Amino acid sequence: MGRQADANAFVPLPVRDGVAPSYLWLPEERWPSLLAFLVQRFPMVSEEDWIARMGRGEVVDGKGVPITPATPFRKQTRLWYYRELPPETPIPFEEQVLYRDEHILVADKPHFLPVIPTGRFLKETLLVRLKRKHDLPHLVPIHRLDRETAGVVIFSLNPDTRGKYQSMFQQRAMEKTYEALAGPMPGRAFPFTYRSRMVDGEGDRFFISEEVPGEPNAETLIEQLGPRGDAHLYRLSPHTGRKHQLRLHMASLGAPILNDAFYPVALPCKGDDFRHPLQLLARSIAFDDPLTGQRRMFASERELGAVTPA
């Protein structure tokens, strides 16, 4: 166990421009060479590109030994490399750091910015931006927000104390509040709790969540804070953490969150409209610090309805 833990802890390539290296476990297969496997495994990366990366020392094995075009394929070993993407479309909104100590960093994420690299986003993510700007190679998010949602995100700075903060979130030992702009709910008495059973969509609806009959597994406390123009401002307190829970619950109540492209009907993807962000904000997170027992509360400084590109 100790030897395996040491292997997992060793990262043979450094963080580069805020981007940590990726790794891949080689499967139980036979290939004439490692290069042949890589070309098949990543069809969007040409053989010439892999050879160039190898020549720059950007592809190594689990011990940090550089891979060459002649390196044989060895199953059940680990390969490290840098993920590369075509030039990304800049997200024209800036994050803010709300708090930082030796253990955690609290950021205020703008709309449209993913928390971690995923899909077509690599450098235009909150994690990579913070790593680059503040020279924080060991930064790791403790929890996530949807790309479309703005607000408070907590990161771990210290690998030695990371587990305590991760356990706190896994055990849901914190209070999260969100704010949303949506239509009215006539006839409703506030506050009230909405419960439903949520499942992941299937087939070509894999990217959304759906409600089905059965024992509820998702619960949200909903409060109305008052009118905002033609809409109403709501405070949403999730007691569970299902994917898109707040967005689906509001849509199911007949008051979908403004500018939601997924609920109640998933609209065709037309790219980001930076003028009309989803009107959902992770307003605050409160918890008892697992190291000191001190009560902590962090709140976003953003306001819904305000769009100011950088």
Image (cartoon, rainbow, N blue to C red):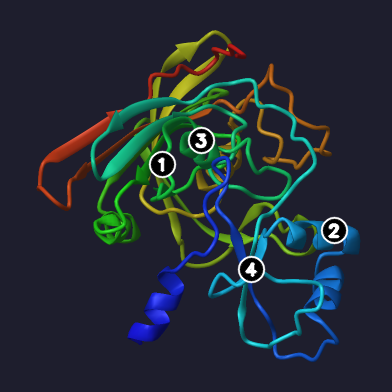
Horizontal relation, residue 138 to residue 28: left or right: left
Q: Which residue is mark 4?
A: 60
Nearer the N terminus, badge 1 or badge 2? 2
- Which residue is nearer to you in this view: 182 or 244? 244
Residue 94 visible within the image: yes
- Element on which disc 4 rests: strand
- Of labels 4 and 3, earlier in sequence is 4
Q: Are marks 2 and 3 in contact (CB under 8 Å)?
A: no
- First in sequence: mark 2 or mark 3? 2
Q: Position of residue 260 (x, y in %)?
A: 66, 33
Q: Amino acid at mark 4?
A: Val
Give yes or no for contact between labels 3 and 1 (Cβ–Cβ under 8 Å). Answer: no
**Amino acid at the residue labelled 1:** Leu
Circle 4 Cα neighbour tier, 10 Å, few/some/many (<14 / 14–19 / ≥20): many
Name the residue: 85% across, 57% down. 49
Name the N-terminal-most of marks 2 and 4: 2
Q: Amino acid at mark 3?
A: Arg
Q: What's the mark number on residue 132?
A: 3
Dot 1: element: loop
Percent coordinates x, y for residue 24 in the rendering = 64, 71
Q: Quadrant of the C terminus?
A: top right
First-in-chain label (4 vs 1): 4
The answer for how far apart the CA atoms under marks 4 and 1 are is 23 Å
Look at discs 4 and 3 and give the one toward the viewer. Answer: 4
Measure how far apart labels 2 and 3 are at the Cα level.
25 Å
Is the residue marked by circle 2 packed among few (<14), some (14-19), or many (20+) residues within 10 Å? some
In the image, residue 95 above or below residue 206: above
Q: Which residue is mark 2?
A: 45
Q: What SS does tag 3 mark?
A: helix
At x 25%, y 53%, the residue is 173
Res. 188 visible in picture: no
